Image (cartoon, rainbow, N blue to C red):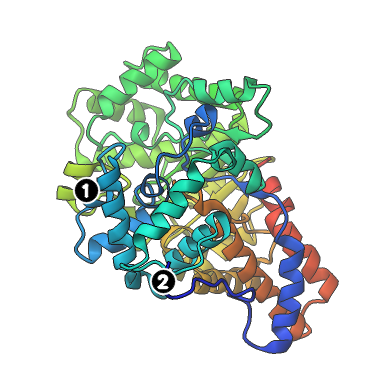
């Protein structure tokens, strides 16, 4: 297999200064072997229940990872050529998609995507040459041969990755049968928990909303013809999720406003929306009101409330119409939190047991809005860099911006937010290395003692996410 060697430097992402790097090495060595906690992710739990071999390298490493496919699309590759929206690919098409990835390996230079892919190839599959047009088929064959081995089945990799717990993202109408089957399987020692994701049920401005709330009523066995029934159905489905192991409810809207409506006004808009007579201003007001209602419900049922706002979903409509959602065409927009969350925080910000974790893809708000709020409100935690910001430099900027104001204890702990199963350990490893480097700098500058830094490093990957997400 000729080609440039694929070598992972043991000090990758650690500080360049030799003295600081030595401290970082020690801190990283303390956290490197610790179990992975993944409280926000998107893997399909059926993969672990069925435990079938992964079919091919493309289906496992390329097609489901929109971080990977979107850069190839930007370089002129049709998403269909990468298997997106194609189902399971025949061998010829799968191999050709893999060649496209390897031939255009240069498009990932300087990106965290390359870091993750290199780690997956080298550390999981033992690949020793860099992807290229010349090495594509040989790498495909090597990874494909490994996937035929029982040691590379989903459950074996879950154990090998040392995943302590992983949360999926689930529709409120789901019967969670896969989660139940996994929990009841005596041969399965792992922990996979659902997450309540009600976005499409909260926004009457979205296509198909009326049908969605009707289905919600059927799932809850509650009439959703009126607003009171709709709210009761949401409450019932949340309790169902809690009974099946859920610890959080996740919300992603264009903005984070939480302006409440009076019960009468909420009921009026709801009825108008069901009849398809509500205007844009009314549907937006209702969605913002319902985000406040989700906070109320979290105070009552204990689900951690996580917010992931500020993304324009399906920015390119032709792509959405052809391939659907979550294929890399979502783009960030500026987002405001201080005034947007004030109604929610005034009402619930000091409620005992309420946890609110706020993520952003607009890093300008880390030190201006999120850290100051998290440094005052007992309920609030700042979510770590997510999506477009889960990159080494951005993680470093986050830690500097947030820690100076709110310390380490007011952040969430790392979330990998991935649909690509094999990228989970690579993403966590990247975060642990960057955090070790940040802490090492504080030790080198005599702002923290080495023992303190070591304890913080461990807390950030263990105690902190467990506490924040009530694990």
Comparing 358 with 178, the one in front is 178
Judged from the image, the secondary structure of the residue bearing numbered disc 2 is loop
Q: Residue at x 79, y 77 (%)?
A: 448
Q: Is residue 266 left or right of residue 368?
A: left
Q: x, y percentage for residue 168?
A: 51, 38
Circle number at residue 80 = 1
Q: Quadrant of residue 39?
A: top right
Q: Report x, y in % for residue 34.
A: 72, 54
Image coordinates of residue 465 in percent, x first then y, are: 66, 50
Can residue 385 be seen in this snapshot? no
How many numbered markers are drawn? 2
Q: Residues within 10 Å of mark 2 (few under 14, many from 20)?
A: few
Between 190 and 452, the one lying in front of the other is 190
Q: Which residue is depicted at the point 47% across and 40% down?
A: 43
Question: Looking at this rendering, what residue extends furthest in the left direction?
Answer: 318
Which of pointers 2 and 1 lies earlier in the amino acid sequence? 2
Q: Is residue 13 above or below residue 297?
A: below
Disc 1: CA contacts within 10 A as few (<14), some (14-19) or many (>=20): some
Quadrant position of the C terminus in the picture: top right
Contact (CB < 8 A) between labels 2 and 1? no
Does residue 238 sit above or below 57 in this rendering?
A: above
Residue nearest the observer in this picture, 176 or 145: 145
Q: Quadrant of residue 273?
A: top left
Q: Position of residue 310 (x, y in %)?
A: 37, 56
The residue carrying mark 2 is 2
Q: Secondary structure at mark 1?
A: helix
């Amino acid at each position: 297999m000729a080609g440039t060697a694929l070598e992972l430097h043991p000090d990758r992402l650690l500080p360049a200064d030799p003295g600081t790097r030595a401290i970082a090495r020690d801190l990283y060595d303390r956290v490197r072997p610790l179990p992975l906690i993944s409280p926000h992710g998107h893997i399909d739990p059926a993969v672990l229940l069925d435990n079938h071999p992964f079919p091919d390298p493309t289906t496992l490493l390329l097609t489901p990872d929109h971080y990977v496919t979107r850069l190839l699309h930007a370089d002129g590759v049709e998403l269909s050529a990468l298997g997106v929206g194609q189902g399971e690919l025949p061998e010829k098409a799968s191999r050709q998609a893999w060649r496209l990835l390897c031939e255009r390996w240069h498009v990932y230079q300087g990106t965290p995507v390359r870091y993750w892919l290199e780690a997956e190839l080298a550390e999981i599959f033992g690949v020793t040459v860099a992807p290229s047009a010349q090495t594509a088929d040989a790498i495909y064959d090597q990874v494909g041969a490994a996937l035929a081995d029982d040691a590379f089945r989903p459950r074996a990799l879950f154990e090998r990755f040392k995943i302590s717990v992983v949360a999926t993202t689930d529709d409120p109408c789901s019967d969670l049968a896969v989660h139940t089957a996994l929990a009841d399987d005596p041969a399965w020692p792992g922990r996979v928990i659902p997450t309540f994701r009600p976005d499409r049920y909260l926004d009457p401005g979205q296509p198909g909303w009326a049908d969605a709330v009707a289905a919600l009523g059927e799932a809850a066995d509650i009439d959703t013809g009126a607003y009171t029934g709709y709210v009761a159905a949401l409450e019932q489905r949340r309790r169902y999720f809690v009974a099946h192991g859920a610890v959080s409810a996740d919300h992603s809207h264009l903005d984070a406003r939480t302006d409440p409506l009076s019960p009468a006004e909420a009921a009026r808009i709801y009825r108008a929306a069901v009849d398809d007579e509500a205007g844009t201003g009314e549907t937006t007001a209702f969605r913002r009101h319902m985000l406040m209602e989700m906070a109320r419900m979290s105070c009552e049922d204990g689900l951690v409330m996580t917010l992931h706002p500020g993304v324009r979903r399906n920015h390119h409509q032709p792509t959405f119409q052809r391939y659907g959602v979550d294929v890399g065409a979502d783009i960030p927009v500026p987002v405001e939190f201080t005034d947007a969350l004030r109604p929610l925080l005034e009402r619930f910000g000091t409620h005992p047991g309420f946890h609110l974790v706020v993520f952003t893809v607009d890093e300008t708000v880390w030190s201006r809005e999120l850290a100051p709020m998290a440094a005052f409100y007992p309920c609030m935690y700042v979510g770590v860099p997510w999506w477009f910001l889960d990159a080494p430099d951005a993680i470093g900027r986050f830690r500097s911006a947030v820690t100076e104001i709110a310390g380490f204890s007011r952040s969430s702990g790392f979330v990998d937010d991935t649909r690509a199963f094999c990228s989970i350990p690579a993403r966590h490893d990247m975060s642990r290395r960057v955090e070790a480097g940040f802490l090492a700098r504080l030790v080198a500058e005599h702002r923290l003692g080495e023992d303190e830094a070591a304890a913080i490093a461990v807390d950030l990957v263990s105690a902190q996410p467990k506490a924040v997400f009530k694990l």
